[in-house]
C-alpha cells in the first residue's frame, strides 16, 4: 500500500520506494504537513511544537489556546485568511470582496491508479503503478471547496500534487493566487537551486542559501521562459551530487509560474510552486471549478544525481507520450542555419540530397516556407505554402525528398501573427492587443488569442491543410516572443487570459497529436524558452537553445540536465565559426556535445569538404551506437562546468554493464594541470574495459581516483570513452 490512512489520528502516509510523505487532518480540520524525506515507518506528529508566540494569531475555534497558530504550523496548502503571514498558496477574493479562505478537512478517497487532469498535462501511470489520494476540504463561511490530489508512484519515487477549486457558494469569486505545492520544513538549513538565463543562454545553475525573507523565481511572460525555469531543488547545505538530502519540485505547466522560498521568523523553511499571480485574477461563478496544474515532487537522500535521475525516469516514461516516446529519434538536418529565409524548393531538395548522401534520416524545412516570409517581419499567421518561393507545391517537394529515402519535417509557429499578414488584416481582433493602445512588438510580431477557441480552431484548420499536403513526419513547434498585452475580446475578466491561453495551446497540441499520431512534434520557443515538463507531455523533445555553440551548450545542457532527461534535449552540430557567438570549436567536440540528446545537424553540408562529410558519417554511426544508452541510461554530471576546466558527463546503463563518458575541455592554459575525471555509477568491485584503448580499469579506482584526461595543445578538445564491464 503506497497510501495509508490512520483513522484514529487522521494521519495520511504516502510511501514511495525510498521516501515517505506524511500529513494530518488535525482536531480543527487543518491539514498539517508532518514529514517529507527518507523512507520511514511511524508517525511524525511528535515534530509539532506549540508555544504562545507574539503577533502570530490564533484561529477562533481553538478557543483560548494561544499556542495554536497557522503562522507557525507546517501546512499542506497554506491559505491567506487563516492567520498565516508567510507566503501562501491560495488567495481568494470572495463574492463580498473580502479576501481570504479557510479550508478544513471534510473527507477523502484513496484509489488505485493515477488521477488525470482535464485539459492539462500530467504524469500518467498504469493502475498497478500508482495510487491516488483525494482530500476534500471546504471553507464553511463561503462554501468554497478544494480537492487536493496526490499521486504516488512508488517505484519511481515520485509524488505528484494538483488541486481542484470549486465555488460552491452563491456569488462570483476571484482566485488571486493559486500555487499547487508547498513544502514546509520545521527545521534544517536548505539551499535553493534554480535555473536562470536569457535567450541563447538558458538554464544557468544557481545555488543560494534560503535566507530570511522571500526568494522568488518567476516567469510573468506567459511562457515558462528563458529567464527562469519552473523547476526548483531544495538541498541541505552539505548535499552534493553524490550524497545528502534534496528535493525537486517541477511544475508541469508551460505558462507564467512562481516559485517562492522563505525562511520564517522561527527558522522554518517554506517552498511553494505554482501559477504566477502576475496578471492572474481568475473568476469563478457559482458552481465553476478551476484546476491547478500539477507539480511533480521527488526526494533523494543520495544527492543531486539520483534526484535528477528520478525526474528523468518519470518524465521519459510517464509524462512523454506517443510513438516516439521510446523509439530512436530521426537524425535531423535542419535548414535554419544552412539558409535562414533565403532558399527555394531546389535548395531544400539539394540539402535533402546531401542528407541522403550522408545517411541523415530527415530534412527539416524551417521558417520561411509560407505566406510572405522572406524575413522575420511578415507572414506569420498565413499558413499557406508559398509555392512561388518554393517553385513547386509542398507535396511535390516532399515526394522528391522522400524518393531520396529522406523523411520530411516542417517548422510552424501557430500562436504568432505579423501585422503584415493577410490573417491580421482580416482579423486584427484575433491578436492579443489592448483596444486603444499600441501593442508591444517583439521580433516584429504579435500573438494570437489562443484563449479563444474560434481563433485556435481557425489556425488548426489552416495548419492541418498544410500537414495534409504530403508525408510530413515531424513538426518543430516554435514560439518567438513572450505574451504581452494580454487582452482578450472574449471576456470581461482579463485576469483569466494567461491561463486560458496555455490551455488553448495544450488543446491544440492534444488535437494535433491525436490527428497525426505518427508525427514527431519537437517543442521550441526561440530555443529553450518553453523547456518545461508541461510541454514534454505533448512534445517528447525540445530544441534546447538557439545557441548551438558546443562550449555554451555544455553549460546550457548541464543546467537542463538537473530537471529533464537527455531524451528531451534536442542538440545539433552546427557550422563554425558558430553563428551565435563566433567561436570555433573542433567538429569532434561539437559532435560530443550534441550527443547529449536527440541528435542532428544545423548546417549546409554542401559547404563541407569530403573529409568533413566522412566525419559526419562516422559521427552518426557513433551516435547510433550509443543512442539507447544516451536516451535511457542513468545520467551523471561528472564536473561543474561553471567552476572547472572540463565539462564532463556520463551515461550508465541501468544494469551497469556499460558507461559512456564525455568530456569537453573548456579552458586551456600554459603548463596545463592534469585533469582526472572521476566516474560514477559503475558496479563496485568490477573491472571495466575502455573500448578504444582496450585498457582495463578497476571500477573502484575509476570512481575513486578517476581517469586522467589527455593534455593537448589547442582549445576545446573533447573526449568520449566507452567502458564495458568485463567481470
Ligand atoms: C526560432 C528557433 C530557431 C528557428 C527560428 C526561425 O528562433 O528557435 O531554431 O526556427 O526561430 O525563425
Image: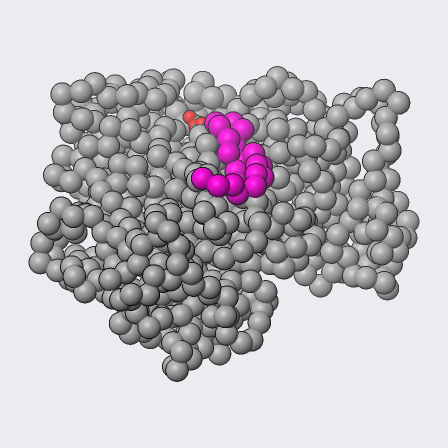
Q: Is 530 left, or right, of 709 in this rendering?
A: left
For the point 19% across and 60% down, the residue is 144
Query: Does the magenta-highlighted stretch encompass residue 604?
Result: no
Outermost residue on the left side: it is 170
How many discs appear?
0
Q: Is 618 left, or right, of 431 in this rendering?
A: right
Residue 552 point in image, percent of width and height:
62, 28
Q: Is residue 42 visible?
A: yes
Q: Is residue 622 visible?
A: no
Above or below, comparing residue 223 to residue 391 in the picture? below
Residue 424 point in image, percent of width and height:
20, 25
Name which quarter of the figure residue 300 lies in.
Answer: bottom right
Q: Quadrant of the C terminus?
A: bottom right
- Indicate the quadrant of ligand 1 in the picture: top left
For the point 29% across and 65% down, the residue is 64
In the image, 309 versus 409, the foreground residue is 309
For the point 50% across and 57% down, the residue is 186
Name which quarter of the figure residue 258 lies in.
Answer: top left
Above or below, comparing residue 214 to residue 187 in the picture? above
For the point 40% across and 78% down, the residue is 9
Outermost residue on the right side: it is 695
In the image, 367 versus 564, the foreground residue is 564
Outermost residue on the bottom side: it is 8
Specify start and end residues of the magenta stretch as a single range. Answer: 194-213
Residue 449 point in image, percent of width and height:
23, 35
Above or below, comparing residue 68 to residue 226 in the picture? below
Residue 110 point in image, percent of width and height:
37, 75
Amino acid at each position: 500500500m503506497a497510501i495509508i490512512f490512520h483513522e484514529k489520528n487522521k494521519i495520511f502516509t504516502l510511501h514511495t520506494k525510498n521516501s515517505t510523505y506524511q500529513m494530518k487532518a488535525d482536531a480543527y480540520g487543518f491539514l498539517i504537513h508532518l514529514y517529507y524525506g527518507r523512507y520511514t515507518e511511524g508517525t511524525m506528529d511528535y515534530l509539532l511544537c506549540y508555544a504562545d508566540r507574539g503577533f502570530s494569531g490564533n484561529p477562533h475555534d481553538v478557543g483560548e489556546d494561544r499556542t495554536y497558530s497557522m503562522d507557525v504550523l507546517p501546512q499542506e496548502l497554506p491559505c491567506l485568511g487563516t492567520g498565516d503571514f508567510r507566503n501562501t498558496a491560495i488567495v481568494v477574493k470572495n463574492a463580498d470582496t473580502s479576501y481570504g479562505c479557510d479550508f478544513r478537512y471534510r473527507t477523502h478517497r484513496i484509489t488505485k491508479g493515477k488521477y488525470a487532469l482535464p485539459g492539462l498535462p500530467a504524469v500518467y501511470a498504469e493502475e498497478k503503478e500508482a495510487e491516488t489520494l483525494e482530500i476534500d476540504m471546504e471553507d464553511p463561511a463561503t462554501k468554497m471547496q478544494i480537492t487536493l490530489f496526490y499521486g504516488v508512484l512508488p517505484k519511481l519515487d515520485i509524488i505528484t500534487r494538483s488541486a481542484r477549486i470549486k465555488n460552491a457558494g452563491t456569488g462570483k469569486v476571484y482566485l488571486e493566487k493559486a500555487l499547487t505545492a508547498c513544502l514546509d520544513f520545521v527545521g534544517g538549513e536548505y539551499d535553493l537551486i534554480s535555473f536562470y538565463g536569457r535567450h541563447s543562454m538558458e538554464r544557468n545553475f544557481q545555488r543560494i542559501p534560503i535566507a530570511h525573507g522571500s526568494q522568488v523565481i518567476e516567469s510573468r511572460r506567459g511562457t515558462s521562459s528563458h529567464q527562469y525555469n519552473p523547476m526548483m531543488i531544495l538541498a541541505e547545505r552539505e548535499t552534493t551530487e553524490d550524497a545528502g538530502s534534496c528535493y525537486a519540485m517541477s511544475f508541469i505547466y508551460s505558462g507564467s509560474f512562481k516559485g517562492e522560498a522563505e525562511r520564517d521568523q522561527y527558522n522554518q523553511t517554506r517552498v511553494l510552486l505554482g501559477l504566477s499571480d502576475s496578471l492572474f485574477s481568475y473568476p469563478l461563478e457559482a458552481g465553476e471549478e478551476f484546476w491547478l496544474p500539477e507539480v511533480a515532487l521527488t526526494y533523494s537522500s543520495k544527492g543531486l544525481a539520483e534526484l535528477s535521475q528520478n525526474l528523468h525516469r518519470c518524465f521519459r516514461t510517464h509524462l512523454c507520450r506517443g510513438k516516439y516516446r521510446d523509439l530512436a529519434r530521426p537524425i535531423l538536418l535542419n535548414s535554419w542555419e544552412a539558409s535562414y529565409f533565403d532558399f527555394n524548393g531546389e535548395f531544400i531538395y539539394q540539402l535533402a540530397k546531401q542528407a541522403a548522401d550522408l545517411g541523415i534520416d530527415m530534412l527539416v524545412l524551417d521558417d520561411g516556407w509560407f505566406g510572405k516570409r522572406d524575413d522575420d517581419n511578415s507572414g506569420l499567421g498565413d499558413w499557406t505554402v508559398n509555392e512561388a518561393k518554393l517553385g513547386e507545391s509542398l507535396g511535390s517537394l516532399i515526394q522528391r525528398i522522400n524518393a531520396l529515402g529522406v523523411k520530411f519535417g516542417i517548422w510552424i509557429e501557430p500562436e504568432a501573427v505579423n501585422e503584415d499578414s493577410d490573417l491580421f488584416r482580416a482579423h486584427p481582433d484575433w491578436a492579443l492587443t489592448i483596444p486603444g493602445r499600441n501593442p508591444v512588438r517583439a521580433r516584429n510580431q504579435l500573438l494570437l488569442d489562443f484563449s479563444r477557441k474560434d481563433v485556435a480552431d481557425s489556425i488548426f484548420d489552416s495548419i492541418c491543410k498544410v500537414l495534409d499536403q504530403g508525408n510530413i513526419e515531424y513538426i518543430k513547434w516554435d514560439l518567438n516572443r513572450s505574451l504581452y498585452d494580454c487582452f482578450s475580446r472574449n471576456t470581461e475578466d482579463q485576469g483569466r487570459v494567461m491561463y486560458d491561453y496555455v490551455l488553448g495551446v495544450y488543446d491544440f497540441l492534444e488535437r494535433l497529436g491525436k490527428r497525426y499520431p505518427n508525427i514527431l512534434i519537437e517543442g521550441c520557443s526561440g530555443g529553450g524558452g518553453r523547456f518545461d515538463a508541461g510541454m514534454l507531455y505533448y512534445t517528447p523533445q525540445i530544441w534546447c537553445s538557439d545557441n548551438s555553440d558546443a562550449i555554451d551548450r555544455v553549460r546550457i545542457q548541464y543546467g537542463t540536465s538537473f530537471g529533464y532527461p537527455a531524451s528531451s534535449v534536442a542538440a545539433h552540430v552546427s557550422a563554425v565559426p558558430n553563428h551565435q557567438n563566433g567561436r570555433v570549436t573542433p567538429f569532434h567536440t561539437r559532435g560530443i556535445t550534441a550527443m547529449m540528446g536527440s541528435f542532428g545537424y544545423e548546417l549546409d553540408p554542401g559547404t563541407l569538404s569530403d573529409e568533413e562529410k566522412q566525419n559526419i558519417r562516422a559521427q552518426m554511426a557513433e551516435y547510433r551506437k550509443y543512442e539507447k544508452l544516451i536516451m535511457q541510461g542513468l545520467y551523471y554530471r561528472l564536473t561543474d562546468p561553471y567552476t572547472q576546466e572540463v565539462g564532463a558527463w556520463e551515461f550508465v546503463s541501468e544494469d551497469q554493464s556499460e558507461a559512456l563518458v564525455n568530456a569537453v575541455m573548456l579552458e586551456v592554459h600554459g603548463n596545463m594541470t592534469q585533469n582526472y575525471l572521476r566516474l560514477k555509477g559503475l558496479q563496485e568491485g568490477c573491472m571495466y574495459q575502455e573500448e578504444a584503448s582496450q585498457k582495463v580499469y578497476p571500477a573502484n579506482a575509476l570512481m575513486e581516483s578517476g581517469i586522467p584526461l589527455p593534455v593537448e595543445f589547442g582549445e576545446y578538445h573533447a573526449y568520449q570513452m566507452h567502458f564495458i564491464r568485463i567481470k
